[in-house]
Amino acid sequence: MRILFFILLTTCFFCKVSCQNADSLTIFYIESKPFAFKNGDNYTGIEFDIFNEYAAWLKGNKNINLVINYKNYSNFNNFYTDLKSSKKTTIGLGSVSNTLERQKEVDFTNGYMKNVAFCITNGNAPDIKSKNKDEIVKVLGAMSALTLSNTVVEKHCNELKKLFIPDLKIKYQNSSEEILNEVAKNVLNFGYVDAVDFWFFLKANPGKFLKMQRSLSQSKDQLAYVLPKGSKHKALFNEFFNSFKLSKNYRIILEKYVGSYMTQNLAVN
């Protein structure tokens, strides 16, 4: 009986320790190549690959084993609304820009990548050679701006409307791919899209005739993981990433999905 009691006591102790070191975490993610997507049974993409490095770091350096659940979203507004009100054991992978407005509602980790946005017109549109009001109005004034609701690219369109084209028509689409397809079809459409989305679209659609208006490019923000207010993973991830961004693995992940040229422009220092 004493031996049996000792075995039971030991088993309970190890179970207790194991449970103390296991953390449940739910990942909200938007299916979007090359950031986060499912390939068969594997979760992959820039955000998932960096997150996996973070999970390994937690296990090796903090003795925390993550038990992960996944929830997929196709709509950014639903993703963001649910995350704001979710438990602190949630992290969002949605290629989300860290902005002052959003910081009032959610927490962000340090940026894992620069967020460069390109102004894209149909290839037949004239070039905008400088950020001059007359030139911008001449080229874009009769066009409609296509954008995504509640995003940084919408903010860029609104800035153009405020600063240069007060009567600019803004139309909402469901994805960057839709914006680029509509711009390619109609010279009277233009829109802002993230640099990575544009690069990925061109690889998949080499025959689309599109033009980047370089003088209107934007690069103010960074992409980051998004968290409910008060999550412990903000401080933990930042501790991890401060050293990881200097490693070869960080560059390898970016180059795997966007190539060496884009990595040089998008990697954070």
Image (tube, rainbow, N blue to C red):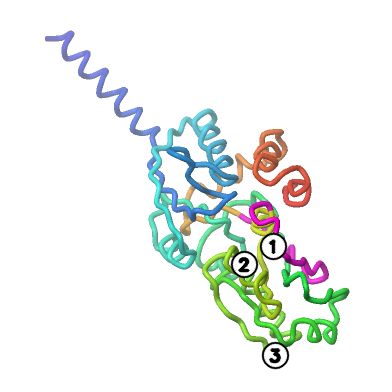
Residue lying farthest to the bottom in this orientation: 167
In this view, 64 is above or below 29: above
Residue range (magenta):
203-223
Residue shown at 17% from the left, 15% from the top? 5
Q: Nearer the viewer, mark 3 or mark 2?
A: 2
Q: Position of residue 174 (x, y in %)?
A: 52, 68
In this view, 197 is above or below 120: above
Disc 3, SS: loop
- Residue wearing tag 3: 166
Cα separation, mark 3 vs mark 2, equals: 25 Å
N-term-proximal mark, 1 vs 2: 2
Disc 2, SS: helix
- Residue wearing tag 2: 181
Would residue 208 be counted in the magenta stretch? yes
N-term-proximal mark, 3 vs 2: 3
- Residue wearing tag 1: 208
Residue shown at 72% from the left, 80% from the top? 160
Disc 1, SS: loop
- The label shown at residue 103 is none
